[in-house]
Image: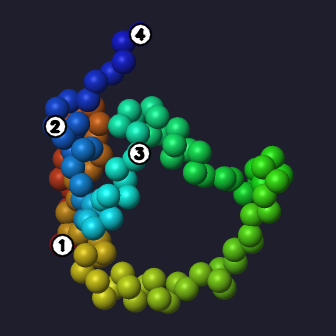
């Protein structure tokens, strides 16, 4: 079975940075990541350790409770910084039909 290909508009969408994905001054930190998507995906998967896998790797995952998460500070950060606010419109992910614009709020 042939591998499906993205339409050029959809492919362009996935390689374009957004305000949420643009590394800015930290771009140099990504220079050593693999260019091959399969290798990059494996690298990303290897960074994640499920909390139930700790015994497999002799690692005790720390317990995080909601009291340890500063929700108030995060809420203030997202309401005070316009760059972190939900945009009025977004480009939706439609890999095989191409991206489309969706209005989230008026």
Q: Sequence order check: which comes first, mark 2 or mark 1? A: 2
Report whether residue 68 is seen: yes
Residue for point 43% across, 85% down? 75
**Of helix, strand and loop, which one carries label 1?**
loop
Image vertical order of residue 67 relative to residue 4, above or below: below
Q: CA distance from mark 4 to mark 2?
A: 24 Å
Location of residue 98 in the rendering, given as x and y in whole percent from the top left corner: 21, 38
Q: CA distance from mark 4 to mark 3?
A: 30 Å
Image vertical order of residue 92 relative to residue 29, above or below: above
Image vertical order of residue 97 relative to residue 99, above or below: above
- The residue nearer to you, when weighing 50 against 43, is 43
Pointers 2 and 3 in contact (C-beta within 8 Å)? no
Q: Which residue is mark 1?
A: 106
Q: Sequence order check: which comes first, mark 4 or mark 1? A: 4
Q: Which mark is residue 9?
A: 2
Q: Sequence order check: which comes first, mark 3 or mark 1? A: 3
Q: Which mark is residue 1?
A: 4
Taking the image as shown, residue 75 lies to the left or right of residue 57, namely left
- The residue nearer to you, when weighing 59 against 90, is 59
Q: Which residue is mark 3?
A: 33
């Amino acid at each position: 079975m042939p591998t499906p290909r993205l339409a050029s508009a959809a492919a362009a969408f996935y390689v374009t940075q957004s305000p949420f994905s643009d590394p800015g001054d930290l771009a140099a930190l990504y220079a050593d990541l693999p260019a091959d998507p399969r290798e990059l995906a494996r690298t990303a998967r290897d960074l994640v350790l499920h909390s139930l896998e700790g015994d497999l790797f002799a690692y005790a995952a720390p317990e995080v409770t909601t009291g340890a998460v500063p929700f108030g500070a995060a809420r203030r950060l997202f309401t005070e910084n316009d760059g972190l606010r939900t945009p009025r419109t977004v480009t939706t992910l439609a890999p095989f039909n191409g991206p489309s614009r969706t209005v989230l709020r008026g």
